[in-house]
Image: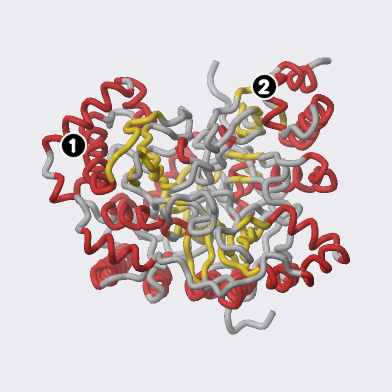
Amino acid sequence: MYRYDEFDHRFVAERTSEFRGQVQRRLEGSLTEDEFKPLRLMNGLYLQLHAYMLRVAIPYGTLNSRQMRMLAHIAETWDKGYGHFTTRQNIQFNWPKLKDVPDILDALASVEMHAIQTSGNCIRNTTSDPLSAVAPEEIEDPRVTAELIRQWSSLHPEFTFLGRKFKIAVTASDQDRVALKLHDIGVQIVQKDGRTGYRVLVGGGMGRTPMVAKELRGFLPREDLLPYLEASMRVYNLHGRRDNKYKARIKILVHEIEIDAFRDQVEAEFVQMDRSAVAAPSEEVDRIIAYFVPPTLPPQAEDNAAIARMRKVDPEFDAWMRRNIHIHKRPGYRAVTISLKPIGGVPGDATAEQMRAMADLAKSYANDELRVTHEQNIVLPHVAVGDLYQIYRGLAAIGLDAPNKGLVTDIIACPGLDYCGLATARSIPVAQAISTRLADRQEEIGPLQVKISGCINACGHHHVGHIGILGLDKAGTESYQITLGGDATETAALGERTGPGFGYDEVPVVVEKLVDTYLDKREAKETFLQTYRRVGMEPFKEALYAA
Amino acid sequence: MPKTFHPKVLTANDLINGNSVFLTPEGWSDRIADAMTALTPDQASDLEALGSRGVDQNDVVGPYLVDVSLDSDAPVPLTRRERIRAAGRPSIAFIEAPKVGQAA
């Protein structure tokens, strides 16, 4: 894992100290809220429906056990004992008091964490593949590139006050686990003619104007990455709209001038700029690479008789093994998905006790690493096959043994009207009701991603849910639009609306009708998405709206 | 047609802890039941003026008026958002762990 260098330590310490002074002046009254708000947002502190909310950055979703324990400590000491893992691989605390936030930031800094650039119109946390250094098909560990981007984008003076927020994701796999095409810029590590470089996508995003990213460069030499990103950001910063915040994202610019014209401008800027001043020095790249050298994993047998026996005698363990385990590039190892979606639970929430237990499991069995996924789950990346039952038992003891990764109860949901000041409808209780209603059938249903947003900003990724649910306010009543066919992976697609919306209480029934229609139309082992793509919208529409 | 005037209470967020609070005769409180109620547009303007004073005195952030019903003992906000906010907690169950040093 990456460790802070002297610069990282200094800038986090300086920022934390600076913010302590700003909070003090706010509490004393020498800063007004109008003056303070942009300062607190630059440090990840929002004011939400019930309380302040602090969003903590988890770079590319990677944590060690010490950091996870610190999150548990923060939850317990300064919050209400839990935290919420987000679709941006971060964590949010929902109840901090303003006076305590400087102490929280000091605590985070002590484990090399912070909340800088988790809000505001800047480059946000760079996300990456939760199966980095695990997935057999990956070209290299994408977190080296993500860390390079993190360093380049942190406190970048030219890009601290963009037209809007800016999100970058990195993957090194052709199996997309980062929603690459739904980011402002998506960076895919690729190989061409024996060389490793980057494919760069631009202009994706969700929100009120969802768009799938377009290819900006098919192959970019490795050394050109940061200059090319800088050139892209510069074109966006110069030409992106600032008159209307809803039209200020890069996707709108790319859409309005079209990708070829955008590319021409980026290439022109790239050619004329001083690329050597921006490119990462090779010694810095080597330093980062050294932090991501694959762990030394002792040889393990691929087959384990004890585990095979336990799968036979413990059907719940067997179900968990079928759903929550991912193949590893090293024989005899697996990655484990810890589902933060217990049946009827709050998607993405974990208590301090659960965080500590996950940290203990990571320390004991997973090379001291945890990964937060954009699907609001946690991954233990390097687990010996022989340890899987111990991990399962450990998770069962804290209620995190749900065998549901990728199933209908593995729902992404934003905080919605229960926490968020922007939300127009509830999303968490909708997720809970769907989860409870369909839990007994989830194995039969198979892979099905339900994603719920409580407003048009789409933090719950509803546009790319196989079944997407968008909660709106219609004349004082919650109304939920349903979309079908969305896809966040390498075959990315935006969902299509079924028709008029439904009331809050109707949504679980509506989802069940959609599921029943799918099961009725399903051929062989088709997934929901495959069936939808084959039969189209009509049968589903008929099931929902026919009298 | 003139817009129907609904009774109103004044809400804001407490500066220090961020909690939703309501203006009462005794100051700001997290209990909407104690809130002063405006029954006319003029009274609503008076509440807003008092809210601005709360901002100036550094007690609260972002005061605004909330439409309420007075059909029950305490004012009840007309929108779900404000009802959730007035409750001071989400509409869902969540596990509130004891603070460090407190008995469970």
Mark 2 against mark 1, which lies toward the viewer?
1
Q: Which residue is mark 2?
A: A498
Q: Quadrant of the C terminus of chain A?
A: top right
Instruction: Tell me what residue is drawn at x 65 percent, y 60 percent.
Output: A338
Looking at the picture, how far across and down is residue B98, in whole percent? Answer: 64, 75
**Label 1 amino acid?**
Phe
Circle nearer the N terminus (2, 1): 1
Q: Is residue B84 visible?
A: yes
Instruction: Tell me what residue is drawn at x 25 percent, y 55 percent.
Output: A155
Q: Nearer the viewer, residue A246 or A297?
A: A297
Subunit of mark 1?
Answer: A
Q: Nearer the viewer, residue B98 or B79?
A: B98
Looking at the picture, how far across and down is residue B96, in whole percent? Answer: 65, 67
Seen as rendered, the residue at the extreme front is A194
- Quarter-wise, where is residue A532 in the image? top right
State whether residue B4 is above or below residue A99. Answer: above
How far is mark 2 from mark 1, CA to CA?
44 Å
Tell me the number on the disc at residue A270. Answer: 1
